[in-house]
Image (spheres, rainbow, N blue to C red):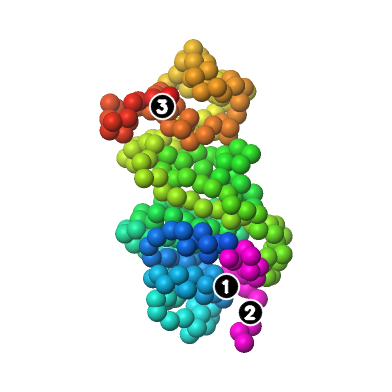
């Protein structure tokens, strides 16, 4: 019988032991299509049940001992690669990312994931507060707003700290990200769009209207007109805006050229 070994503290390893959480995770992966790349499979708590999906499965594990141990237990169509996910090349062809992310590396791993090409869906366990903010629950973070035109985020459930061994100091959250088939902003405008979001989030003012008015691209009249159009209070903070509102703000008031909007789309969303 296989005995689960404790995770290594320096690698932030907290292995899942809750069968209900594992089943929920694998169920979300099963609803996707294509090869699966698992981030940090560790002792295989998610790898082994995902292997039963019968799809190509590659685990990218930074701990050499864990990688060798798990590789001995797996067979086709699964394999384990000893590598650091942050540096491991990902395919440009469609695939699914899945993983219980090390809590101390959640943000850097999410940036790596969002910047990677090819993948269509990501099923992830992150720190609870990170999962909430990424999904826009209680207000979106700047990082979420910067990526919303290209990805949809959804929070599925809270994962109690008791579901892990060793037990972390905070709960986790089961989060999915899906690449939009029709992005709200052209991918080539990503840098300009993300800069606008950063400027709005870090801008000075007691609400969205004042923040926008302080930007050279918009007058106070335009800022108030935009908030009325979207039913946003002038005193609201940037975190309350949703994906479509961010896209409209960018395309309507910060277009770099006539081709900023996607073909066939109006420059503003109504």
Dividing the picture into quarters, in which one does residue 45 lie? bottom right
Which labelled disc corresponds to residue 269?
A: 3
Dividing the picture into quarters, in which one does residue 34 lie? bottom left
Residue 111 location, x and y as percent?
Answer: 48, 51
Which of the two labelled residues, at mark 1 and mark 3, occupies the earlier sequence position?
Answer: 1
Residue 116 appearing in the image: no
Asked if the stretch drawn in magenta spans residue 6, the answer is yes
Q: Is residue 156 above or below residue 184?
A: below
Spatial CA span between label 1 and label 2 = 9 Å
Residue 142 appearing in the image: yes
Q: Nearer the viewer, residue 241 or 12?
A: 241
Is label 1 in a helix, a strand or a loop?
loop
Which of the two labelled residues, at mark 1 and mark 2, occupies the earlier sequence position?
Answer: 2
Is label 3 in a helix, a strand or a loop?
loop
Which residue is identified by label 1?
Answer: 45
Q: Write the start and end of the magenta stretch as one range.
A: 1-23
């Amino acid at each position: 019988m296989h005995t689960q070994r404790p995770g290594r503290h320096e690698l932030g390893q907290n292995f899942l032991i809750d069968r209900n959480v594992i089943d929920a995770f694998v169920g979300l992966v099963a609803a996707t299509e294509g090869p699966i790349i698992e981030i940090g499979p560790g002792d295989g708590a998610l790898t082994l049940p995902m292997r039963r999906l019968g799809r190509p499965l590659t685990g990218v594990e930074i701990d050499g001992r864990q990688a060798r141990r798990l590789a001995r237990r797996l067979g086709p169509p699964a394999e384990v690669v000893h590598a650091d996910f942050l540096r491991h090349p990902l395919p440009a062809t469609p695939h699914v990312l899945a993983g219980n992310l090390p809590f101390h590396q959640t943000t850097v791993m999410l940036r790596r994931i969002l910047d990677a090409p090819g993948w269509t869906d990501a099923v992830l366990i992150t720190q609870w507060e990170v999962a909430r903010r990424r999904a826009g629950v209680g207000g979106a973070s700047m990082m979420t707003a910067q990526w919303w035109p290209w990805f949809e985020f959804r929070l599925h459930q809270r994962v109690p700290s008791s579901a892990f061994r060793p037990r972390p100091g905070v709960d986790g959250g089961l989060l999915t990200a899906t690449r939009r088939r029709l992005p709200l902003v052209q991918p080539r405008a990503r840098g300009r769009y993300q800069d606008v979001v950063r400027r709005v989030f870090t801008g000075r003012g007691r609400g969205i209207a004042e923040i926008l008015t302080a930007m050279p691209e918009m007058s106070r009249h335009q800022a108030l007109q935009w908030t009325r159009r979207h039913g946003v209070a002038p005193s609201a903070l940037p975190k309350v805006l949703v994906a479509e509102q961010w896209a409209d703000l960018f395309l309507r008031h910060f277009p770099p050229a006539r081709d900023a909007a996607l073909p066939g789309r109006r420059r503003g969303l109504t």
